[in-house]
Amino acid sequence: MNLFKIMGVSLILTIIIELVCALIIGVRNKKDIVNVILVNILTNPLVVSISFLINLRYGLIPKRIAMIFLELFAFITEGFIYNKCLEFKKYNGFILSFILNFISYSLGLIINYIIW
């Protein structure tokens, strides 16, 4: 699979999963829903493309190590944005970011395991 196809599929699945989870948690404000989408458009392509290129250049083990830092980057970035921009205050932005990223990453691993 090429990088752009991987990025597209990953972004779409991440947005769907995180939106469903956000709705389940109680995010209902249209502005907040748009923010969840925009935050993922910001972070997901960076994480996916960098991890893809690391895997291509250095292999699977360095990619797995890099994923720790890339996911940490996504979690922190999204947490700051959620704290600053969301009207949803039931959870701190970092907790919301952790929940959404944990679920989408975990489901992504399961989907990849099933497909590959």
Image (cartoon, helix red, strand yellow):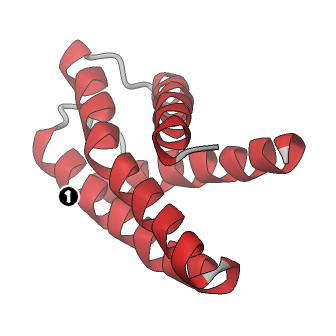
**Residue shown at the point (37%, 25%) measured from the top left:** 27
Above or below, 49 relative to 13: below
Question: x and y percent of residue 4 in the render?
Answer: 45, 40
- In-image side of 49 versus 64 (left or right): left
- In-image side of 110 versus 86 (left or right): right
**Residue shown at the point (19%, 36%) measured from the top left:** 86
Dot 1: few (<14), some (14–19), or many (≥20) neighbours within 10 Å? Answer: some
- Of the pair 107 and 26, the residue shown nearer to us: 107
- In-image side of 64 versus 34 (left or right): right
- Image quadrant where residue 20 sits: top right
Question: x and y percent of residue 109 in the render?
Answer: 73, 53
Position of the N terminus by quadrant: top right
Question: x and y percent of residue 104 in the render?
Answer: 58, 44
Q: Is residue 92 visible?
A: no
Label 1 element class: helix
- Of the pair 107 and 91, the residue shown nearer to us: 107
Q: Where does label 1 land, which residue?
A: 80
Above or below, 106 relative to 37: below
Q: Is residue 56 visible?
A: yes
Above or below, 90 relative to 56: above
- In-image side of 53 versus 6 (left or right): left
